[in-house]
Amino acid sequence: MKIVDEGFYLYSKKYGEKSKIIYILSKKNGLIRGLSRYSKSQTINLINLDKIDFTWSSRDKNGLGFVKFEQQKKNNIDNNLFLIVKASASELCIRFLPFWEENIEIYNDILDLSLMKKMNENYLLGKYIYWETKFLKNLGYGFEMNECAISGKVDETYFISPKTGNSVCYKVGEKYAKSLFKIPFCIKDQFRKESYKDYYEALKITEFFLLKILETKKLDFVFRNQVISYIKKS
């Protein structure tokens, strides 16, 4: 079978002397991987979230397959934080998305992230964390911020439940405060401003739900940890 599609380069690893296994988030087929052969005169010089056109071919859809690709117009912005953010998003896609399952919402969110032009660091960090919240939503772990799950009151939410992701107002959650997350203002405000002071608190919440999906107590992501380190130093 043969697939012709477009997508985002996520990662590659060496396979033998003249091949690499390349991971792609494709538009029509979700996460896929395949073998890409190269020579000394034709190496893979892609970086995370570079846009590519590609063909994938194999006798069996469950096989590794072979990939041939061409890079589309490159985003020439080489801001270091932007590179880290794109690498972190790539890591999460590889770790959490199943193969061959289309998700156009996740694809479009990656597209928006990859095409960012504004390189203000606080703005960039906010956009990345917002991307994580939307990524969780598309994995089935979204946050309901606007309405208290118990009282039904709107715009008075204060805590997030680690069990359900639902929110409650202060009066409802006060006596359970130690077992609930306080909603960071950046999440409640849906990252409308260019800068917030509670990015780290927001990342602790998204990390909790990522760990919950993986059913583990430890999350070891190289580039996501760099994003966290960047925030701590700011």
Image: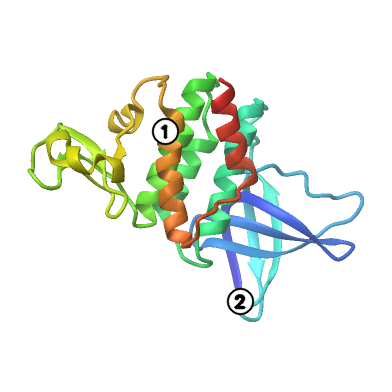
Residue 18: give x, y in percent of width and height: 87, 61
Compared to 187, does 223 lie above or below? below
Taking the image as shown, residue 171 lies to the left or right of residue 94, namely left
Taking the image as shown, residue 171 lies to the left or right of residue 197, namely left
Say the numbered circle drawn on residue 1. 2
Identified by mark 2, the residue type is Met
Check disc 2: other Cα within 10 Å, few if <14, some if 14-19, many if 20+.
Answer: few
Which residue shows up at 60% across the image and 40% down it?
Answer: 225
For discs 2 and 1, the disc positioned in front in the rendered view: 1
The local secondary structure at tag 1 comes to helix
Along the line of sight, which residue is nearer the eye, 104 or 15? Answer: 15
Residue that protrudes farthest toward the bottom in the picture: 59
Say the numbered circle drawn on residue 89. none
Identified by mark 1, the residue type is Glu
Q: Residue tagged by mark 1?
A: 201
For the residues labelled 2 and 1, the Cα–Cα distance comes to 47 Å
Compared to 188, does 122 lie above or below? above
Which residue shows up at 53% across the image and 33% down it?
Answer: 115
Along the line of sight, which residue is nearer the eye, 207 or 140? Answer: 207
Taking the image as shown, residue 191 lies to the left or right of residue 19, namely left
